Image: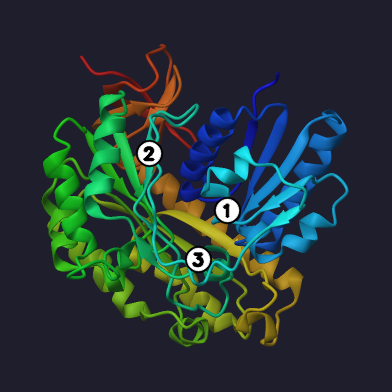
Amino acid sequence: MAATEIVTFGCRLNTYESEVMRGHAENAGLGNAIVFNTCAVTAEATRQARQAIRRARHEQPRARIIVTGCAAQTDPQMFAQMAEVDLVLGNEEKMQTDSWSSPGSERVRVGDIMPVRKAALHMVDRLAERTRAFVQVQNGCDHRCTFCIIPFGRGNSRSVPAEDVVEQVRRLAANGYSEIVLSGVDITSWGADLPSAPRLGSLVARVLKFAPDLKRLRISSIDSIEADPEMLDLIADEKRLMPHIHLSLQSGDNMILKRMKRRHAREDSISFCAKLRARRPDIVFGADIIAGFPTETEPMFENSLSVVDACGLAYLHVFPFSPRPGTPAARMPQLDKALIKERARRLRLKGQERLQAFLTNEIGATRQVLMETAASGRTEHFAPVKFMQEMTPGAIVQAMITGRDKTHLEARLAA
């Protein structure tokens, strides 16, 4: 019987949960099945999932096709109406053992995720084909940004207890993972629902203290306005915490930020980057920015372009605005699609310029590279690196940066 294939779209949280589902499917003896773990962040993400489902049915007509993830949670009937789909599972249901061991007759098993109040961590020993591991520390979101559908796919914010996170990190480190990324939907809200309401900084400190064999720790995308003082101290001073922070920025214009219902202003982001850079000069920042949000004028868009330089961003993840049904932003006056596409192009060009400047400045430096394949890996600053010689995937090697291409650094082993 063929093994279950997992096709993952979207975020690191999905990647971690896909591994949990793989374990459930194996334990249940499920075979000759393809599971699509979908993303709902953009309409394009949903379109890609539907396209992949159709292609899979054409290529494997006898396979059982199961669809889950955020797009399945927010619009289960859309997938249920696809002739190619055998079963639709909700985000809570996909993590339950019974969903995989008791097939049942219904095609849709998607419950109301909003009442869910606990984030149960399902321990894993590995992540298939990954040299760095992701650990879920939080799920859901209590905020209601006007463009975002994810709270309706993930539910309200709930935190994994610190002792469970530490146990999972220790388990993965013992299995050979040198680098772990703490992941969640709104990671800086971690702890608010736990006794005594600890903050993210205390969790990171516990992981570093009680997992001494872990060589490198990263945190996923954060809201800078919610970063607590202990977290900032750790970013500034803890060498095992990698000097690369990804910000949920979304816009550089204060009026657009208000219409997005974000909790920070342009000035907050600029100040955050400047203060951390003063304390840890080698730190690099990335950010998410949406191009073409409803009502965005050219001067407002120019503020997003200029905040890239003002924050000194090295990496840019650009999202052309995509209206998600049911969100307030979908009811706002929309921009022309061609204009949105053009603004996204200009933002990406700015991002390429910033990345290339950063890569150029790295030439001549000595960096510690986590090998992802036999000939490529990532530095502490998450810069992609290629080598001429081959090494062991998963190893951390000391490298001399000798040059760069448009998208990556070139290196050799340091003497």
Mark nearer the N terminus (2 vs 3): 2
**What's the residue type where badge 3 is placed?**
Ile
**What's the residue type where badge 1 is placed?**
Glu
Q: Position of residue 137 (x, y in %)?
A: 34, 53
Q: Position of residue 328 (x, y in %)?
A: 61, 84
In the displayed structure image, the side of residue 74 where residue 173 appears, left or right: left
Q: Quadrant of residue 102?
A: top right
**Residue at the spot 60% in from the left edge and 77% down from the top edge:** 293
In the displayed structure image, the side of residue 342 where residue 210 appears, left or right: left
Residue 274 versus residue 220: which sits nearer the camera? 220
Residue 196 versus residue 172: which sits nearer the camera? 196
**Residue at the spot 70% in from the left edge and 75% down from the top edge:** 325
Which residue in the protein does label 2 denote? 123
Which residue in the protein does label 3 denote? 289
The vertical placement of 359 against 160, above or below, is above
Which residue in the protein does label 1 denote? 93
Q: Position of residue 249 (x, y in %)?
A: 42, 68
Indicate the quadrant containing the N terminus: top left, top right, bottom left or bottom right.
top right
Q: How far is disc 1 from disc 2 in space, using C-alphas?
A: 17 Å
Local SS, label 2: loop
Local SS, label 3: strand
**What's the residue type where badge 2 is placed?**
Met
**Residue at the spot 47% in from the left edge and 62% down from the top edge:** 288
Looking at the image, is mark 2 or mark 3 nearer the viewer?
Answer: 2
Q: Residues within 10 Å of mark 1 (few under 14, many from 20)?
A: some
Indicate the quadrant containing the C terminus: top left, top right, bottom left or bottom right.
top left
